[in-house]
Image (cartoon, helix red, strand yellow):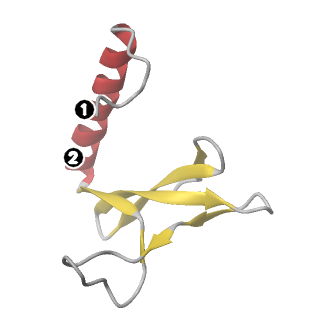
Amino acid sequence: MSEAISTRNGNGIILEEYKGNYSLSSMREGQDGVFRAQWATYQLGKDKHADKDWPVKVNLGDRATAIGALKMLLAELEENAANGADGDAPF
């Protein structure tokens, strides 16, 4: 759907759409400069993990829900910048 956006230190994200649902997927930049999906084995319970790896992503929902969620995140980032926040998480 879109090109990977480089964030920092070989990390990136990409906006993807599948059957009307949008997601942000985590990407890693290889030594050849090509971004590839980052995969992980998910924990299903206290001592149980999935049998296969899945791409690391955040599902945003349909188009309207995705736009709303991203606008809320952007507003939070802008508010933090206006308040002089240094970008460190409060936890």
Which residue does the image show at 38% across and 15% down from the upper left?
85
- x, y percentage for residue 75? 29, 24
Label 2 residue SS: helix
Give the residue furthest to the bottom. Answer: 51
- x, y percentage for residue 69? 24, 41
User: In the shown orientation, is residue 86 left or right of residue 49?
Assistant: right
Look at label 1 and name its amino acid: Met
- x, y percentage for residue 16? 43, 60
Quadrant location of the C terminus in the rendered image? top left
Check the image and report above or below for 64 versus 47: above
Quarter of the view holding residue 88? top left
What crowding class fits label 1: few (fewer than 14 Cα within 10 Å), some (14-19), or many (20 or more)?
A: few
Q: Which residue is mark 1?
A: 72
Which residue does the image show at 25% across and 84% down from the upper left?
48
Give the residue furthest to the top. Answer: 83
Give the residue furthest to the front. Answer: 47
Question: Disc 2 or disc 1, which is closer to the eye?
Answer: 1
Label 1 residue SS: helix
Which residue does the image show at 51% across and 51% down from the upper left?
13
Quarter of the view holding residue 24? bottom left
Pointer 2 or 1: first along the chain: 2
Which residue does the image show at 78% across and 61% down from the upper left?
31
Q: Nearer the viewer, residue 40 or 33?
A: 40
Look at label 2 and name its amino acid: Ala
Q: Which residue is mark 2?
A: 64
User: In the shown orientation, is residue 14 left or right of residue 64?
Assistant: right
Quarter of the view holding residue 17? bottom left
